[in-house]
Image (cartoon, helix red, strand yellow):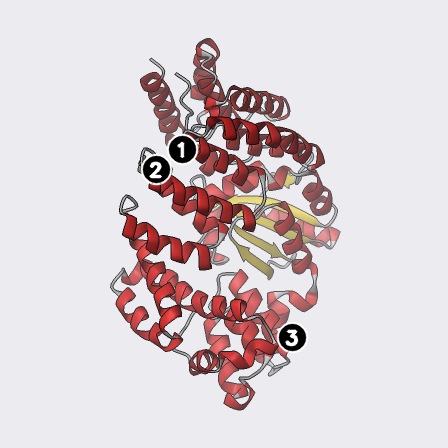
Amino acid sequence: MKKALLIIAAVIFSGQLFAQGIDFEHGTWAEAKAKAKAENKLIFVDVYTDWCGPCMRMAASVFKDSKVGEYMNSNFISLKIDAEKGEGVDFAKEYEAKAFPTLLFINGDGEVVYKSVGGKNSEEFIAMVKTALDPAKQLSSLEKLYNQGNRDKKTVLAYIAALKEAYKDHTKVVAEYLNEIGEKKWDSKVVYEIVSKYLDDYKLPAFEYFVKNKTTYEKHASKADIDLAIFTVFKMNFIKRFNTEGKEIVDEIKEAAKITGETMHTHISNYFATALGNDWGKEDFRKIADSNIMAYSTAWEIDKYINIMLYEKNPADIPEELKYAAKWCKRGIELEDNITWHAKYIDILIKQGKNAEARKLLLELLPKADKEIEASSNKANAMVTCARAFIRGDLGKIPEAGQKAEEWIKEAIKSDDSFINNTILFSALSVNEKQDELKKAYEKLEKMAKNDMAKNYVKSLYTYVNGTNK
């Protein structure tokens, strides 16, 4: 039975290790500072935890990217610190590393020059590093200028951006600056930039002004972008408050959103229904979700909604749900035209019983995937990404998909025989029903599992395969 194995760890443990990446030091924090002083370099510190998914992804891909390594090794002393072990516990407290990964750039005196929180791909990481090296964009420099009274628009926007990137409270500076420039200057491009990029407090007078006078900002942006900025303020306010205040805040935010007008208010209400709802089997709910998804959802959000509907709740036998999933997947492709999105769409076609069309698209996608791998600066990582996409859901029912995924992941393992890659190989072998190899892969994973999370995951994999392949 060729039933594709949905690898949850392919999301958690995504990516792979590859040679010629960042050359991390293996000494202490004190030794890293001493070396940085002696070589007149900044220290890059990756503060991580064992359970952090984005940390694992970056360790497995970004930090092993040859281009990233080439750039970092010539400019920085690099160090990895586990926030929950050894000296990392005190280090995390001192440098306020509360979410992970926390990426720090520190001078030889131990002073933070730049701080960023959250996972990044290779391109985003290199862009961040260049920002960290630019004195005009370093948080420490910008904070000093702002505290000295510098209110130049460029400086203020850069300061707000640096605060947000560092997970520091940027809302105070936003409110302070908007209040200082006064209502007479709210009709300006800088206010549009603040609202569209950094604002999450709909209670500010400047935001109410922005909503009521939104047509005046059309000289700075399109109507669609202005509407998206307004929608995002309410969405981000909800995201910011939900974990501590619960869904009770929804009624409050919906009431406040009435100032946006009937159409926008409906979209905001639909967002809450989509974010909080779980009844994907009902047509009315799907229509509400569709309105929000097609108008304002990011690719990440669309992917999440499709996964909930098709993979986590298994209602794939309901044709109407699959129609919506296919529609949303096409929207995802519009936003992020990559192999993973195309593979997801093919999987949906298979679930719809459109096997001929699915196979045709797969055969067209295979050479594109090979070309993408060949063009990548980190070919092994690209092979892992493609392999993971080709074994998800029911895509492995097409023999060429499972076979190609196995080929890619075995090639990637030649340069990185990691736990991450072996979990994906395990999935590919399951899809291809290679029982003898599957047992050996399981025994290897058992030996490679270093903590309880990994050990339990390996057991669940084998239990799943035994249950579906008997």
Other residues around mark 3 within 10 Å, as few (<14) / some (14–19) / many (≥20): few
Q: Position of residue 423 (x, y in %)?
A: 47, 26
Depth order, front residue of 210/456 = 210
Mark 1 vs mark 2: which is more N-terminal?
A: 2
Q: Residue at x 61, y 78 (%)?
A: 219
Query: Residue 31, percent across and down?
Result: 62, 46
Tags 1 and 2 in contact by the CB under 8 Å rule?
yes
Q: Amino acid at mark 2?
A: Pro
Amino acid type, residue under disc 3 in the picture? Lys
Residue 360, x across and y down, in percent: 56, 28
Hey, what amino acid is under mark 1? Gln
- Which badge, 1 or 3, is on the more N-terminal residue? 3
Q: Is residue 152 left or right of residue 303?
A: right
Element marked by disc 1: loop
**Residue on which disc 2 sits:** 319
Q: Which residue is mark 3?
A: 154
